[in-house]
């Protein structure tokens, strides 16, 4: 067989680069961040285009940063720039003037492109026209928009059952496009709407809906400024929400104590030099965390229970000082059983399971004991654990004991990932829509939406394997690289008849594809979006429930790009034709018309078109933020919940691995090969390991090893990783996503939320012998 006819590997090329290491940093941002931000724009060849766009990013009337979902200040925006280093990198990545033309695809086979790393693929430039890969084809060829839509429609209409198609969403998609996308899927007849939330904050939504009656956080940015204690647990703000650092700094200046809980001493948790203020760029770093707890991977449940036990003991000693009795009585249920449960624990055992010293845990409880304005912020370190839902419910327990929800300066703060991932869900992109939401759509549009729950990400992958899924359509994202069990997922993807990706750049999911494949290029956040001669704006919802407008300002790289709203409308018209009762033509031409109908279908969007035009946008209602807990099952009370402390047994030579992001990537988009804060340069295939473990295994820092996982009795191997001695708890290792995804079993999921447990992977580590 010619190599071009073979299936290319679904993984990044397994070769090493040229690692150099430095000691990890004890503070984040400052001058290096400013320099890094500007370097990327220069490297993409767009210093002017880029700087002009940066000046508009996250400013009122400008566009929403395409990177993370951290909110913008309600009042003053920084004059130095309301963006961070990583926002600037995200912009450089999409605003690049490099283009992929038909010629590029003619000269490069799919096989050859798959030999490149994600980093190299991403740097090739923006997609400029629709491309089609025929069955058995080796190269993508240009296809007209019309033919592309007809081809997809043909495939969709040939299905025996609409549930043989799945419609994936990544979290960049605007509110307007998201709403139309789910409407199309439902009118077509399926709730198969897997999305990146199924790998990200599904765990938070599940835990919060069950306990406080809303699947979102309850705090605003001002709450962070006014808190007494901010706990940052399982999250790396210096890298993944750098503008959160300004809020932490302000909170700290106003007197808040910060507790950081993380197996790694992340630079952004320890200190900060604010690059948005001149004294921050050049002055001394502000110390952020007052207390750092280097918890063992998955040791958080034991830690949280230990804190609860200490708080309980303190309350017994000083009644009324620690617990908020009025709040507990008025708003909660299940307190007695919960206290009995907490009392039954042994403090030493809990502290031991958390991998911490009793002294550190006591200090944490001490900081919390007489405070009420407490905020918990969390990220993937908790949501991607097998018992993530339980752990978040445990955090809720603490805030209920303290009466911290629904007050200024207190509450729950899941730090969302993608810039509009929260908006996607509000717009009903959800494989489990509620009867109430569906009734409303039915009443507004006059068709009966499907009621059965659809596939989430993990179920989609299984359905690909079993050939229950025949068409896979993705609105953004990089399904192959973002999902677990890379080899298994790739096998599944290759079984579908057609894979379609709406994308701004080429990525691995276009190279590991269905029997036929289509790439539809689209506009990015920073691009001008002109419809019928008029500049349009879209809207998004940030991590704190603020809906605001976003208007791109850059000239698109190609005249042949259309926006996501138009792609969906044209797809719907081609597929449903006269079967449809929705006026797709109207929505195709006007985002205002889309917003008008969203207002009719979803609560909280009254006068959407007017309010979204107001400077700074508007807050969506959030009952829990107002101290009301609309839990049906518990008749408007927030329940205390009882969850077990997991018993983790590791066999001899087995380690627990968490996969994380470097400072130089946005998920599967790799900006560069550095992880500056952790002291890593020119390599992504590294495994952070405790010095003592390195020694006891007979390894040395810098040794080249292979990593193995044996879940489900299958050997999964990730070859060629370099050991880096690091300040990490014994028995734990950390690698980067997506290189290590091949090791994560598809069956290693979070209870209830069914998310892949990307931060709880059992691995074995062996020397790589055939290294020259
Ligand atoms: N620049 C940039 N910004 C981003 C992204 C990006 O890739 N690049 N991605 C976006 C997306 S989609 C998301 S979801 C967020 C992700 O943002 P984060 O939630 O910060 O994601 P991760 O980098 O995966 O790392 C989470 C942290 O969890 C810690 N951790 C691992 N295991 C445990 C554990 O058992 N307990 C505790 N307490 N901590 C643990 C890790 O050491 C790490 O510091 O960021 C968003 N913003
Ligand atoms: N091992 C491991 N795996 C993980 C994680 C982890 O921590 N560890 N984290 C998980 C998390 S939290 C998430 S959110 C997922 C992310 O999963 P995805 O959302 O699927 O992945 P991304 O890398 O964010 O998607 C990047 C692609 O989106 C496309 N894109 C960018 N902007 C736009 C746009 O405006 N429109 C369109 N149509 N396309 C666009 C680009 O072409 C780019 O290639 O990964 C998950 N996977
Ligand atoms: Mo995410």
Image (cartoon, rainbow, N blue to C red):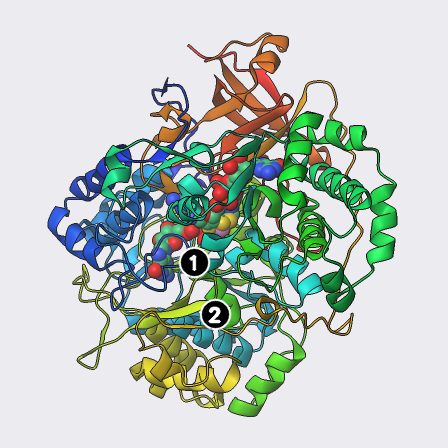
Q: Residue at x 15, y 48 (%)?
A: 46
Q: Disc 2, ligand 2: is the CB inside 8 Å?
A: no
> Residue 690 in the image: x percent, y percent?
57, 18
**What secondary structure is found at the residue carrying circle 1?**
strand
| Mark seen at residue 540 | none
Question: Relative to residue 730, is residue 74 depicted above or below?
Answer: below
Is 545 positioned to the left or the right of 709 in the image?
left
Query: For mark 2, what is the residue?
Result: 155
Find residue 612 and report its horizontal and vertical position in percent.
Answer: 35, 77
Residue 503 horizontal side relative to residue 555, left or right: right
Pointer 1 or 2: first along the chain: 2
* CA–CA distance in space, label 1 to label 2: 10 Å
* Secondary structure type for disc 2: helix
Q: Are marks 1 and 2 in contact (CB under 8 Å)?
A: yes
Residue at horizontal 30%, vertical 72%? 615
- Return the residue nearer the eye: 476 or 416: 416
Where residue 516 is drawn, which disc sits there? 1
**Residue at (44, 27) in percent of width and height:** 685
Q: Is residue 266 above or below residue 329?
A: above
């Amino acid at each position: 067989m010619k190599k071009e006819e073979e299936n290319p590997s679904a993984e990044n090329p397994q070769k090493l680069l040229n690692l150099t290491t430095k000691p990890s940093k004890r503070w984040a941002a400052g001058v290096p961040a400013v320099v890094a931000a500007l370097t990327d724009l220069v490297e993409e060849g767009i210093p002017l285009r880029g700087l002009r766009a940066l000046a508009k990013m996250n400013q009122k009337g400008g566009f929403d940063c395409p990177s993370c979902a951290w909110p913008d200040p309600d009042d003053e925006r920084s004059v130095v720039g309301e963006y961070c280093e990583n926002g600037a990198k995200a912009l450089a990545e999409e605003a690049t003037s490099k283009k992929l033309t038909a010629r590029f695809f003619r000269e490069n086979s799919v096989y050859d492109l798959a030999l490149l790393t994600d980093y190299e693929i991403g740097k090739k430039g923006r997609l400029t026209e629709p491309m089609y890969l025929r069955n058995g084809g080796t190269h993508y060829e240009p296809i007209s928009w019309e033919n592309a839509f007809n081809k997809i429609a043909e495939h969709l209409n040939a299905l025996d059952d609409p549930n043989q198609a799945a419609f994936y969403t990544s979290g960049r998609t605007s509110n307007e496009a998201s709403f139309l996308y789910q409407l199309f899927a439902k009118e077509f007849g399926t709730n198969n709407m897997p999305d990146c939330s199924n790998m990200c904050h599904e765990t938070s939504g599940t835990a919060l809906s069950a306990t406080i009656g809303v699947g979102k956080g309850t705090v605003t940015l001002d709450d962070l400024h006014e808190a007494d204690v901010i706990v940052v647990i399982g999250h790396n703000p210096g890298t993944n929400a750098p503008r959160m650092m300004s809020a932490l700094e302000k909170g700290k200046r106003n007197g808040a104590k910060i507790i950081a809980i993380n197996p790694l001493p992340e630079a952004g948790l320890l200190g900060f030099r604010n690059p948005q203020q001149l004294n921050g760029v050049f002055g001394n770093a502000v110390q952020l965390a007052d207390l750092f707890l280097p918890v063992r991977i998955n040791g958080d449940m034991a830690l949280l229970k230990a804190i609860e036990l200490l708080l309980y003991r303190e309350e017994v000693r000083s009644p009324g000082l620690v617990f908020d009795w009025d709040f507990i009585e008025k708003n909660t249920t299940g307190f007695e059983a919960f206290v009995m449960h907490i009392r039954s624990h042994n403090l030493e055992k809990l502290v031991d399971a958390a991998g911490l010293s009793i002294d550190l845990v006591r200090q944490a409880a001490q900081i919390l004991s007489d405070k009420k304005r407490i905020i918990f912020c969390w990220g993937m370190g908790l949501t991607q654990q097998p018992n993530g839902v339980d752990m978040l419910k445990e955090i809720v327990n603490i805030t209920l004991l303290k009466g911290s929800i629904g007050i200024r300066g207190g509450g729950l703060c899941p730090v969302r990932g993608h810039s509009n991932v929260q908006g996607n869900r509000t717009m009903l992109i959800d494989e489990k829509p509620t009867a109430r939401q569906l009734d409303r759509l039915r009443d507004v549009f006059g068709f009966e939406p499907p009621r059965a729950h659809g596939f989430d990400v993990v179920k989609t992958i299984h359905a690909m394997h079993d050939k229950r899924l025949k068409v896979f359509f993705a609105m953004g994202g990089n399904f192959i690289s973002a999902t677990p069990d890379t080899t298994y997922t790739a096998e599944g993807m290759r079984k579908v008849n057609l894979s379609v990706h709406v994308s701004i750049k080429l990525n691995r999911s276009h190279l590991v594809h269905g029997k036929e494949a289509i790439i539809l290029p689209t506009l990015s956040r920073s691009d001008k979006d002109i419809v019928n001669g008029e500049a349009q704006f879209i809207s998004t919802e940030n991590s704190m429930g603020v809906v605001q407008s976003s208007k791109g300002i850059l000239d698109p790289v190609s005249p042949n790009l259309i926006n996501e709203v138009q792609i969906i409308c044209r797809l719907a018209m081609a597929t449903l034709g006269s079967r449809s009762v929705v006026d797709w033509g109207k929505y195709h031409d006007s985002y205002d018309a889309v917003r008008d109908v969203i207002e009719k279908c979803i609560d909280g969007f009254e006068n959407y078109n007017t309010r979204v035009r107001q400077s700074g946008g508007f807050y969506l209602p959030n009952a829990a933020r107002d101290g009301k807990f609309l839990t049906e099952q518990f008749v408007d009370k927030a329940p205390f919940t009882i969850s077990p402390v997991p018993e983790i047994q590791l066999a001899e030579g087995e380690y627990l691995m968490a996969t994380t992001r470097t400072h130089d990537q946005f998920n599967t988009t790799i900006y560069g090969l550095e992880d500056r804060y952790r002291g890593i340069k020119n390599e992504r295939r590294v495994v952070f390991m405790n010095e003592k473990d390195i020694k006891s295994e007979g390894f040395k820092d810098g040794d080249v090893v292979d990593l193995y996982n044996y879940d489900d009795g299958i050997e999964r191997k990730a070859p060629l990783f370099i050991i880096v001695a690091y300040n990490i708890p014994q028995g734990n290792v950390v690698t980067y996503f997506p290189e290590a995804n091949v090791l994560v079993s598809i069956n290693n999921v979070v209870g209830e939320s069914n998310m892949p447990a990307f931060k709880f992977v059992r691995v074995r580590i062996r020397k790589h012998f055939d290294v020259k």
